[in-house]
Image (tube, helix red, strand yellow):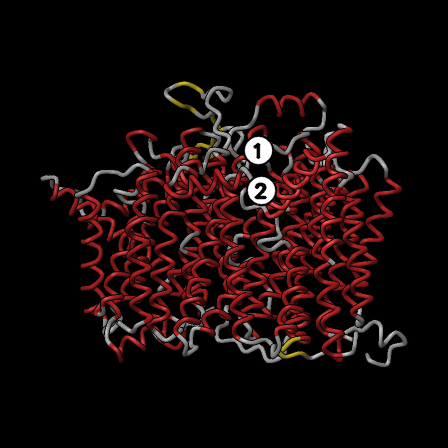
């Protein structure tokens, strides 16, 4: 029962969704300020979700169960992920060993949900979006995994978030070393792509694909995808903090670091043009993979 | 169990008992499936299937190397006969026979060397160290035979061909399940019982495993044929098993063996569903399929579960065994030697990225076959045929059973498969991590139920409306705008150095069989050139030979 509560309220669904929607507002506000606009009020994202819940659900002909099931799948698995993350952040010992790998796998689930949902909608634009999405997954997954392994090696072969945090509390944040800094850059860009933010948003390109993977979604299912995105916007930077800046995670520092990462993601988003999907692939399998391998090599020599 | 009447010849222990069970299960399912699928030469077909099952059980139970060798060789024969029952499969069957049969010869050599070293044929009496080059050679010979059977690099090339042209139940029965079980079982037996492994050998296995994972899955990404794609995945997954066994620590080995069992389950399921698709659509080319989820819901769900399972999506069984293998690799990271560490890291990266690639390739399959835009011609044809629904009962039941096993083995991994089958076989498994699969699934399921409850209670059902999909303000024209999904990964095919590698791979440069064939036919052409059938030239050869002979004799 207690677990169910932590899954649904804190640090699971309700908590992470609220933080995520609020972060979404920060994103919109900062973007607006960069573009010399005023920007929406702080409750705008909450209103959007509530509004979507009241809208009619339109399903393209031919699609049914898979189309409605996909958003559930994505949302539930990110909620599970943020619960695991939040619990092991709260009390180091409460995470189970091996949770790092589980989280890495659960982080792929939203993309899968998106792809399955899109392909079941029978819309050619959604199919193109799905094909771009899966290619983006392939692109960022390689350097992402390499950097995660660098962190595992740095923490003495531990795949438990609690002990990675413990290790950093004694030996200093991972980002403070050469290899850690390199891996941090790589993971920051991978997160940008996982969030489907510019410059890696080819799968949802509004101008050419009309939101691509999401094109046929409306009402409640769309709201669920939006919530999934919001929770990712909360969980991914926290994951980054845990891996790289885990020396001091008392609430004040945690919030400070979170805002720092959030703002840098938003700045990258607003100052870059969209990449084509083959450029994305080239970027991640080229420079980013090299950086990640370099980081791995440096960790072997203890740098 | 040593009191059995058959003891010196056959032996049942913790490692082989569950393999026997699995063989029996897959044989039964294959026979059920074939009832409707196989229409010609039934007598031969069922004879071969039953003989195969019998010989496989013989291999697994054998405690005598000669007996094992006989059963093993017999399996090569039935494999050839079964593969050649497919249409236009003569070449593939020949290739299969040559590769598998050739590796049997290697195994014979290995067995002979073992006898020379130990003076015994009994498996439970053999315990070798790698202290002489002969021991190393014998190990490598038998390991290569295992690789050929299970399909690891470099002897894997028969699997995609055989999978494509053999009948679907045969592909599900032999390359997908039984051959994996046997090959990896023998490898595990070698590593656990027959030989005392050292670091160099383990590293050799790990490198083979990692290379197999990546190369085979990269090939699978660009395939256009459903069964051939699955064949490449059957190769790629062997990489995980070999990698797990190669880690040399209990959890890695247990993970490898568990993955063998899981692989047999989900890969058979996938081949059965491929058979269903072929049965309905009369083709297995991906670009002619599409939108089958509506026609065949049970097949679709089984295929989806098995796809998630093979891609290692939690909480299905594939995730669990892969996760155990990762743990085995991470445990090895504590090794002091930095070269071993580096190899471990590379293998870990290959394994984790490999499962991402697997996922990508199955997303393509799901899109092209079941979702996506339907191929209108196909749908029309099956509507005209008056059978717009599922395939016959005996054909959707086996994949469904296997899909259920996928879920059960994933969610209750500790309670059922690991405790009953795997832990007795591999002593000393020590978990450094525990993943509460059951609990997490419970959370996800409760979330789903809660969501549905809210959905119902608000009466949202009445809000749902179906409408045609639009594109550019007009209802979409599926004949014109169809995205089949086979071109998903052309970007990757065109990527830098991969382009050259793919071109060479498609022309068979990396295929040992093709290379050997080229060398042999080159030699044959030279001999052909000599035998031109003109009498004077033969006379000249005879004369030259006589002169040579005389010269040698005169000297003496």
- Nearer-the-camera pick, B534 or A156: B534
Give the letter of the chain under mark 2.
B
Identify the residue at horizontal 58%, vertical 77% (top origin): B429
Q: Give the class, few, some or many, for how many residues have Cα within 10 Å of label 2's Cα (few <14, many ≥20).
A: many
Name the spot of residue B525 as percent of width and height, x first: 66, 36
On the rendered image, what quadrant is the N terminus of chain B found in? bottom right
| Disc marking residue B286 | 1
Q: Give the class, few, some or many, for how many residues have Cα within 10 Å of label 1's Cα (few <14, many ≥20).
A: many
Res A9 → quadrant:
bottom left
Q: Are marks 2 and 1 in contact (CB under 8 Å)?
A: yes
Identify the residue at horizontal 59%, vertical 51% (top origin): B235
Q: Is residue B554 left or right of residue A139?
A: right
Q: Circle 2 is placed at which residue position?
A: B229
- Nearer-the-camera pick, B319 or A24: B319
- Nearer-the-camera pick, B289 or B451: B289
Q: Is residue B402 left or right of residue B338?
A: right
Q: Is residue A184 above or below residue B328?
A: above
Q: Please, what secondary structure does the residue beneath circle 2 have? A: helix
Q: Please, what secondary structure does the residue beneath circle 1 have? A: helix
Label 2 in the same subunit as label 1:
yes
Give the letter of the chain under mark 1.
B
- Badge 2 or badge 1: first in the primary sequence: 2
On the rendered image, what quadrant is the C terminus of chain B found in? bottom right
Name the spot of residue A27 as percent of width and height, x first: 21, 48
Residues at marks 2 and 1, CA–CA distance in whole angstroms: 10 Å
Name the spot of residue B538 as percent of width and height, x first: 76, 34
């Amino acid at each position: 029962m207690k677990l169910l509560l932590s899954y649904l309220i804190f640090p699971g669904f309700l908590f992470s969704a609220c933080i995520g929607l609020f972060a979404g507002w920060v994103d919109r506000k900062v973007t607006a300020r960069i573009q010399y606009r005023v920007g929406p009020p702080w409750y705008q994202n909450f209103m959007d979700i509530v509004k979507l819940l009241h809208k009619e659900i339109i399903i393209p002909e031919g699609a049914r169960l898979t189309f409605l099931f996909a958003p559930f799948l994505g949302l539930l698995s990110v909620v599970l992920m943020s619960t695991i993350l939040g619990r092991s952040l709260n009390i180091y010992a409460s995470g189970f060993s091996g949770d790092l790998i589980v989280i890495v796998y659960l982080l792929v689930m939203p993309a899968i949900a998106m792809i399955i949902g899109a392909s079941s909608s029978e819309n050619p634009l959604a199919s193109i979006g799905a094909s771009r999405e899966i290619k983006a997954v392939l692109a960022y997954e390689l350097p992402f995994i390499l950097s995660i392994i660098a962190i595992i090696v740095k923490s003495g072969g531990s795949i438990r978030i609690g002990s990675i945090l413990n290790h950093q509390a004694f030996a200093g944040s991972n980002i403070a070393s050469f290899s850690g800094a390199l891996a941090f850059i790589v993971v920051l860009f991978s997160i940008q792509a996982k969030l489907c933010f510019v410059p890696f948003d080819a799968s949802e390109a509004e101008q050419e694909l009309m939101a691509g993977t999401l094109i046929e979604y409306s009402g409640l299912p769309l709201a669920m995808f939006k919530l999934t995105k919001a929770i990712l916007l909360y969980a991914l930077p926290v994951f980054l903090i845990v891996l790289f800046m885990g020396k001091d995670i008392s609430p004040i520092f945690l919030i400070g670091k979170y805002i720092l990462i959030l703002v840098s993601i938003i700045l990258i988003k607003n100052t870059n043009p969209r990449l084509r999907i083959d450029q994305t692939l080239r970027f991640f399998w080229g420079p980013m993979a090299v950086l990640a391998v370099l980081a791995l090599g440096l960790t072997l020599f203890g740098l | 169990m040593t009191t059995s009447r058959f003891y010196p010849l056959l032996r049942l222990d913790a490692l082989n008992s569950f393999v026997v069970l699995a063989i029996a299960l897959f044989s039964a399912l294959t026979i059920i499936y074939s009832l409707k699928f196989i229409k010609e030469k039934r007598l031969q077909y069922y004879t071969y299937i039953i003989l195969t099952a019998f010989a496989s059980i013989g291999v697994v139970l054998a405690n005598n190397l000669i007996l094992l060798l006989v059963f093993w060789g017999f399996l090569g024969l039935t494999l050839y006969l079964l593969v050649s029952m497919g249409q236009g499969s003569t070449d593939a069957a020949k290739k299969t026979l040559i590769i598998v049969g050739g590796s049997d010869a290697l195994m014979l050599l290995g067995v002979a060397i073992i006898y020379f070293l130990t003076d015994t044929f009994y498996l439970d009496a053999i315990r070798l160290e790698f202290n002489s080059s002969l021991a190393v050679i014998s190990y490598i010979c038998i390991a290569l035979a295992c690789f050929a059977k299970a399909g690891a690099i470099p002897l894997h090339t028969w699997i995609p061909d055989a999978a494509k042209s053999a009948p679907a139940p045969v592909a599900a029965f032999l390359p997908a399940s039984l051959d994996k079980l046997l090959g990896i079982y023998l490898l595990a037996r070698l590593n656990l019982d027959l030989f005392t492994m050292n670091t160099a050998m383990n590293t050799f296995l790990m490198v083979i495993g990692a290379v197999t994972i990546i190369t085979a899955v990269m090939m699978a990404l660009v395939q256009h044929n459903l069964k051939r794609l699955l064949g490449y995945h059957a190769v790629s997954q062997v990489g995980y098993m070999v990698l797990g066994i190669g880690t040399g620590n209990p959890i890695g080995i247990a993970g490898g063996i568990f993955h063998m069992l899981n692989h047999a389950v989900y890969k058979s399921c996938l081949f059965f569903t491929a058979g269903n698709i072929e049965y309905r659509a009369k083709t297995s080319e991906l670009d002619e399929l599409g939108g089958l989820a509506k026609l065949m819901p049970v097949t679709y769900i089984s295929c989806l579960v098995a796809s998630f399972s093979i891609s290692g999506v939690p909480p299905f069984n594939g995730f669990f065994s892969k996760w155990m293998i990762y743990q085995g690799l991470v445990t090895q990271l504590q090794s002091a030697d930095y070269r071993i560490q580096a190899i471990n890291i590379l293998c870990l990266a290959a394994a984790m990225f490999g499962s991402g690639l697997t996922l990508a390739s199955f997303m393509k399959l799901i899109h092209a076959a079941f979702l996506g835009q339907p191929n209108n011609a196909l749908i029309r044809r099956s509507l005209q045929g008056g059978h717009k629904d599922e395939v016959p009962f005996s054909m959707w039941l086996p994949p469904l059973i296997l899909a259920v096993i996928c879920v059960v083995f994933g969610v209750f991994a500790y309670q059922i498969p690991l405790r009953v089958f795997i832990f007795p076989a591999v002593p000393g498994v020590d978990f450094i991590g525990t993943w509460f699969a059951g609990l997490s699934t419970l959370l996800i399921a409760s979330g789903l139920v809660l969501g549905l409850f809210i959905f119902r209670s608000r009466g949202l059902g009445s809000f749902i409306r179906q409408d045609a999909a639009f594109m550019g303000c007009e209802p979409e024209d599926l004949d014109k705008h169809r995205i089949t999904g086979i071109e998903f990964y052309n970007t990757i095919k065109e990527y830098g150095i991969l382009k050259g590698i793919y071109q060479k791979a498609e022309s068979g440069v990396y295929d040992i069989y093709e290379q050997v064939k080229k060398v042999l036919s080159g030699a044959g052409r030279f001999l052909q050139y000599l035998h031109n059938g003109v009498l004077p030239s033969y006379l000249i050869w005879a004369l030259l030979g006589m002169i040579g002979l005389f010269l040698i004799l005169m000297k003496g």
